[in-house]
Image: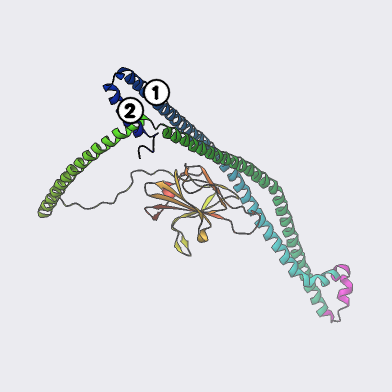
Amino acid sequence: MRRARRSSPRALILPAIAAAALAATGPGAGAASRSKEAATREEMQAAEKAKAAELAAQKQAAAQSAAARAEEQRLTDERIAAAAKLREAEAATAAAAARMEELAGRQREADMRVAARVVALEPLLPLIERLALYPTETLLAVPLPPDQAVRGLIVLQGMSHRLAAEMAALRRDQAAWAEATKAVQAEAPKLAAAQKAQAEQAEALDRQIALAQAQRRSADAEADAAADRAAKEAARADSLRGALATLEAQRKAAEAKAREEAVRAERQRKEAEAEAARRREAALSRSTGSMASAGSSATPHGRALLTAPVAGSIVRAWGDTTEAGPARGISYQAPPSARVVAPCSGRVAFADSFRSYGELLILDCGGGYHAVLAGFARLDVKVGESVQSGEPVGVMPSWDPAGTGRRPLLYVELRRDGQPVNPAPWLKSSS
């Protein structure tokens, strides 16, 4: 086997030792020794060069990795700042949408009142028109005795007053409808401007997210390439030093294993003694009753505040009555296409569609806490990614403030050790 692998370190060691031994017994021992020393020095220099190249490659990979982490942190900070700026634009959109929704409701109410007035007056329109054009002829054409004609005239006069009042109310409703329509038309440009500003901020944020993802992929590729280069350099260091180091490592490993076995045996002995002591102490405590103590529930001394995940107001609080029972989370009513940010720093544990929840995001906030968010139109993170509090993670659906459709909600649930808890005490103010 050694004869077949002539380039291996072991193949270099044994012939070198044999040659040195033979040379020492012959008349050319000095020359052979010098030749062997020169060969050894060359091999040692080759090993040093290989090691230096490996070290340089590892340092380069470490520097590139550190630079990539620093750049990613910088971009993360920029995304968090951009998300905060976008939150302001979304708040303006929410206010404009609320005004538009109110005005549209007033417009619909006025329109319904006008329609009701028209329906009520429609059967009387022929008589109103005839009385307006020919009042005297209309009364004389009725074949009634004089006393009944007088009563009819009085009735017609009362009807005339009622019709006049109805017409005045109709004109007021029409004026209210016109005013509401004018207000809606005046508010529409404001809403459009707010939505445009929000869209521009969202596009800028999307560009930053795409840039961060591209740079992360580039850094990962460069780190992989550096690791490959380091591995190749390490493989080329198959020389005398490598063989000797392998033998030395095997010897040290055997010694370390022996020491570990001794330490393990000593630790097991001490653990057995400690367990015996604990049992004796427990038996003594049970017999005297002096060491019994009541259990206590652990309560946190402080809470890490959570960032409000979206602009808007809370429309369903923790514990509110729902069709499925008391609410186990809170629901936000967000402006159209609002950007959702991470309420805590942590790792993405789940990011995908899930049953009736739609797009669902679960963040591992650490310490046994998980944040569950549902109601997205789009998710911008993947499983395994790390996010910081306030970093954008997705987008809410769009909706028409002037329409009558149901507004989308962002559902937020906080779980501790798998059990839902009220997130309100942990939430920072969204203002």
Residue lying farthest to the front in this orientation:
27
* x and y percentages locating residue 422 in the rendered image: 41, 53
In terms of secondary structure, where does tag 1 sit? helix
Q: Amino acid at mark 2?
A: Ala
> Which residues make up the magenta segment?
130-147
Q: Is residue 207 magenta?
A: no
Which residue in the structure is indicated by mark 1?
42
* x and y percentages locating residue 209 in the rendered image: 56, 41
Q: Amino acid at mark 1?
A: Glu
Q: Earlier in the sequence, mark 1 or mark 2?
A: 2
Which one is nearer the viewer's eye here, 357 or 99? Answer: 357
Question: Which disc number belongs to residue 16?
Answer: 2
Question: Which disc number belongs to residue 281?
Answer: none
Tell me where residue 130 sits by quadrant. Answer: bottom right
Q: Residue at x 19, y 41 (%)?
A: 262
* x and y percentages locating residue 284 in the rendered image: 10, 51
